């Protein structure tokens, strides 16, 4: 698949995972003028088949056990997302999606971080009362998702309205494109290494245990590199070039593109503990680290 098609496929998956009904996603694909893998019009049937194919997550089914395993080939989405998709399809609307999966957290994947523990990412999840929020897994501080995302959204909008921002965005995006290139090279090297591991074993030069340990180490590096590449590609591929009015774009952009824009603009969003008990808002608690460095 070419890059714009990859971006479209990811966008479709992200819409479905955040609860958009499949017929609506098909309508969106058609309205945007996208075609299926064979060039035909998207239908719920062709979308269903596309999404049920493990290859889109770099997976395949073991022909004997039916279990999913990694092929070592790059995927469009993560194995986790693939399992979520299929769990969702299997439920056929009988059971509502899990409470954590149904809120499209804008600042997950390491954007929101705990200012008290200096570093670890905050993860999206619901409070006991069902309110979407971000929480530090280490110290437990929390902020409601609405408060944090509104605050970040307002500031992002302000930044997008500045004339200098586009240049800064393009520069940031170039860095992500370079990182994507270097990750692709790294993945190629690692894939080659994994293939070559078997030769000394076959010739009796190393033991089976050594082979297994070496294979595990390389596979772990591959997994890390691929996960990072999927993240980086989403940011590197956001179509900035065709966007005339960034503010208007933000107001209508799909969720995955907004997240990518936040990553382009912000190196991190630090959340500090609330001063008073029960304070859950963003006032005075959030520090934005601009990647664009407030370029003049
Ligand atoms: Zn913390």
Image (cartoon, grey):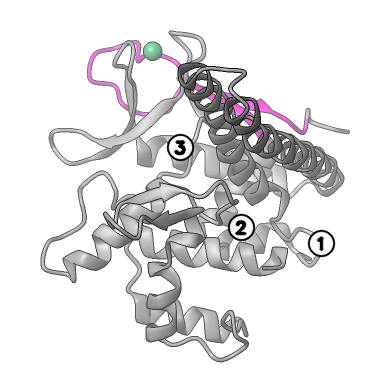
The local crowd at label 2, few if under 14, some if 14 to 19, many if 20 or more residues have their Cα within 10 Å, is: some
In the rendered image, the vertical position of residue 291 relative to residue 209, given as above or below? below
Residue 157: tell me if it is visible.
no
Residue at screen point 32% across, 10% down: 139
Q: Return the residue at label 3.
A: 108
Q: Are marks 3 and 2 in contact (CB under 8 Å)?
A: no
- Observer-nearest of 267 and 180: 180
Q: Quadrant of ligand 1?
A: top left
Q: Which residues are magenta?
A: 266-292
Q: Residue furthest bottom?
A: 40
x and y percentages locating residue 150 in the rendered image:
46, 42
The local crowd at label 3, few if under 14, some if 14 to 19, many if 20 or more residues have their Cα within 10 Å, is: some
Question: Within the magenta stretch, is there residue 75?
Answer: no
> If you read the primary sequence from the N terminus, does the residue marked by circle 3 or circle 2 appear first?
3
x and y percentages locating residue 206 in the rendered image:
58, 17
Residue 32: tell me if it is visible.
yes
Q: Return the residue at label 2.
A: 250
> If you read the primary sequence from the N terminus, does the residue marked by circle 3 or circle 1 appear first?
3
């Amino acid at each position: 698949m070419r890059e714009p098609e990859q971006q479209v496929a990811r966008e479709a998956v992200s819409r479905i995972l955040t609860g958009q009904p499949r017929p609506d996603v098909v309508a969106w694909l058609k309205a945007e003028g996208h075609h299926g893998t064979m060039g035909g019009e998207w239908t719920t049937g062709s979308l269903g088949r596309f999404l049920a194919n493990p290859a889109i997550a770099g997976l395949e089914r073991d022909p004997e056990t039916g279990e999913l395993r990694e092929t070592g080939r790059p995927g469009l989405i993560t194995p986790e997302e693939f399992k979520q998709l299929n769990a969702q399809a299997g439920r056929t609307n009988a059971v509502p999606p899990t409470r954590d999966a149904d809120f499209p957290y804008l600042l997950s994947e390491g954007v929101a971080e705990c200012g008290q523990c200096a570093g670890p990412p905050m993860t999206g999840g619901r409070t006991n009362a069902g309110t979407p929020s971000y929480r530090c897994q280490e110290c437990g501080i929390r902020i409601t998702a609405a408060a944090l995302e509104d605050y970040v959204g307002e500031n992002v909008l302000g930044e997008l309205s500045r004339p200098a921002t586009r240049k800064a965005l393009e520069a940031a995006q170039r860095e992500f494109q370079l990182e994507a290139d270097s990750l692709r090279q790294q993945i190629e090297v690692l894939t080659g290494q994994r293939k070559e591991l078997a030769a000394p074993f076959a010739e009796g030069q190393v033991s089976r245990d050594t082979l297994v340990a070496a294979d595990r180490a390389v596979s772990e590096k591959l997994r890390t590199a691929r996960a990072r590449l999927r993240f980086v590609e989403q940011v590197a591929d956001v179509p900035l070039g065709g966007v005339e009015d960034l503010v208007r774009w933000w107001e209508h952009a799909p969720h995955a593109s907004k997240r990518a824009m936040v990553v382009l603009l912000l190196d991190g969003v630090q959340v500090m503990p609330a001063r008073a008990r029960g304070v859950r808002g963003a006032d005075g608690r959030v520090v934005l680290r601009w990647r664009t460095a407030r370029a003049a």
